[in-house]
Structures are given as structure tokens and as C-alpha cells.
Amino acid sequence: MALIGFGTVGRAVAKIICENNSSGLRLTHICNRNIEKKKEAGVPSNIPSDVVWTDNVESVLNSDVDVVIELIGGLNPAGQIVRRALESGKSVVTANKQLIAREGLDLLQLASRNGCQIEFGASVAGGVPVLPALRTGLCGDRLHGIAGILNGTCNYILSRIENARIPFSEALEEAQARGYAEADASEDLDGGDARAKLSILALAGLHARVEPESIRARTIRAVDAVDFDYAAELGCTIRQISRADLKENILFADVGPCVVSSDSPFGRVPGQYGGDMAFLGAGAGGDPTAVAVVSDLMFVAQGLSAKFGGRNAAGRDAASSVSTPSISSDFESPWYLRFFVKDQPGIVARLAQILAAHHLNIDALLQKPGFEKSSLPFVITLEPCRDSQLHPALEEMAGLDFAIRPCLCLPVLR
């Protein structure tokens, strides 16, 4: 087998393959740009001397290897490499979430036509066997919904705000200093990474083809330390949640911060017959992702007729079993509304008037003492209503003269 991409994950994959002599896996090629420079940075001592090191992708694709491991990421040239490997009858293992989120079904069908496989268990929550569980462990069940914490950067930042009661900006700087967040962390903070993963899970578990960009993504940037104080009053905390519910031919999908019960699996994070299921573990980093890649390699090497959500993993039934539903973010749920206002008489009455005009029912009003009157935070929680019913009211509230920040609106998941 050939390894294309010798970065953090690639090194870990090579090390695991070469130290497990009983696995039946044999690494023959390692390919990367500027390969000599990569070798100077350090090579696992257990890599055999007969492994071919090259920066020529063509030599790998034209070789007689059975499996190509793609770990360079991104859409191109990774997509071209994966397609050419499959077209030549080579199976592919990849951790490329962006590629699978956008082209996963097409690649499954391409693999099927050429009698090979494509496996991508490492593309979502690398160290947590979510995709293998959907593919085999739950194939006798019928799933209608999926929800999860899919981005480690957001989970770290929100947890730090909660535990240290520090501002968002400080938590982000800390995450960047520790290497948990990129210098430009927009893809994580604004939900792009998580919605790509959610689209993969929707394909695997719900048999629904979803373009990542069609899923609404909400940022965590507006979450403040005070929100965790108010969430605690409700017996809750705040996490970035990715969720998808399939109802008839509509997929309700959304990524963003949500208020969740503190004693739920989401609050505790450091199918029909199966009930609610939660998978917890290390979902990011070189070693957990490498373990998932090697697990996929062994799955391919064993020649199993894999089941992908009850269908063949190579995609033989993909065209007939996967639907293309309409996408909506119009969930019905209770809501958490946090306001920052310049205190003056009649604020609550005015807000209540707007909510009543839109047929929205107040569940509770929370106001903690000790804040400056010039920047006073308080919370209104609402009884369940549709997203589409709430947002006209929010637009009207945004124009009120006493509002000094936009209202933070979070769904409450119970």
C-alpha cells in the first residue's frame, strides 16, 4: 500500500502499520512534496529500508499497490488523486472530510464500478468509531436523527469560557497558543468544519445526500462568560452541536451553539430499537486519526463485504438507497435569548409586547444582580416554537434603542 501525505497523521499511520507485523499490511511507498525535507524532520525508526520514498504521485498511481492512503487533505489535488486511484482499481482510505462531504457518494459509486473500496472512517471524529458503527453496528436499525459535538476547537474554547469564566477572545488566544486552533480559526468557530462532518454522517446514517453549504452554520463568537452563568441557572451548559433530523423528505440540519442539559452526554463531554446512543472519545489529533485510518486499512485488507448504513460500503446500492432531501433549519425547540441593554424603564414590557405580537410564549425571565446599568445582561427563555416564527421577532428587537448588543439566540436541547 502507498501513503500519500507524510504530515502529522501520515507519520503516525506509517509507524502503526510498520510496527504491527501481524496485520497483513505492508507499506511500500511514501509520497509527499519535498520528500527529502520531510525525511529530515524525522522518520519513524521502524519503517523498512525497502519502502520507496518519492514526490512523484504518478509513480504511485502507476504502481501495483492495492491500496492508496490519501492524507494530504483539501479538494485538489487530493480529489484528482483519489479518483484516479479508484479508476485504476485501487482501493482508497482517506481522512479527507472536505472531499467526502462534497463528493462522497460519487466516489462510492466510482469505487463500485471499478471493483474496489473507499473507506473514510477517519474523516469524522477520528478516534471515535462513529462511521464504522453507523455502517455495521447499527445497520439493523433505522436512524431518523443524528446529533453530536464534532469540532474539538469549539469544544475546548466553550469549555474554557465555562470553567474559567474568561472572555471568548482570551479562550481563543489560549487555544491558538496550545495548538488547538489555527491562526485563522474561522472554519472551526463559524461551523464550517462541523457541517462538513455532519453532511458525511447524514450520508452514512440517514442515507441523505447533503451539500455542506446547504446546512446553516452559526458562530460561537457571540457566546459570553455570562451565558454560562445563566445556563447554569437552567441546569444547562453551552456546546457547539451539529444535528440532523430526517422527516419524510425534509432534512432539518443545523450547526451552532446550543444550550444543553449539564447531565446529558453533550454536557458531560471532556436508532429506534437501540435508543439514544452517544460516542465519546478523542476525536482529533494525529494518533487518534491514524488509528481510524489503520482500522479502515485493515477493513479493506480483510476483503470484507462492508455494509454502509445497511448498504455495501463500496456503493453498489448507493444510487438507489441515497435520497436528496430538501434542507431546512426550521427546528422547533425552546429558546434562550440573552440581551445586553442600557437599563431604563419598560424594557421587559416592550420585549414582551413584541414576543406576544409574534405569538411567542415566555417561559422564564432571568436577571442576575451586580452588573453595570449601562450594560445589563438578562435572559428570556421561550416555550417551544419554530425557528421561522422566532426570527421576525428578533429582527424587530434588533432595532430597539436600548439594545447595546445583538440578542444571542440559542436553541435549548432537552
Image: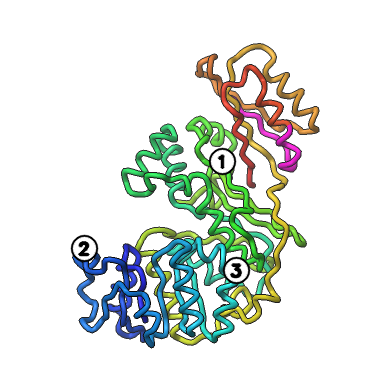
Extreme residue in the top direction: 345
**Magenta extent:** 378-392
Residue at position x 76%, y 33% in the image: 361
Residue at position x 38%, y 35% in the image: 170
Q: Is residue 271 visible?
A: no
Q: Where is 357 relative to 191, above or below?
A: above
Q: Position of residue 264 (x, y in %)?
A: 56, 50
- Check residue 41 in the rendering and tell me which mark sits there, or answer none: 2
Residue type, mark 1 in image: Cys
Main SS, magenta residues: strand
- Check residue 404 in the rendering and tell me which mark sits there, or answer none: none
Give the quadrant of residue 402.
top right
Residue 121 magenta-drawn? no
Q: Nearer the viewer, residue 264 or 127?
A: 127
- What colouring method underlies this structural image? rainbow
Q: Where is 87 relative to 162, above or below?
A: below
Q: Mark 3 and mark 1: span between their CA atoms?
A: 30 Å
Q: Which residue is mark 3?
A: 204
Q: Which residue is mark 1?
A: 236
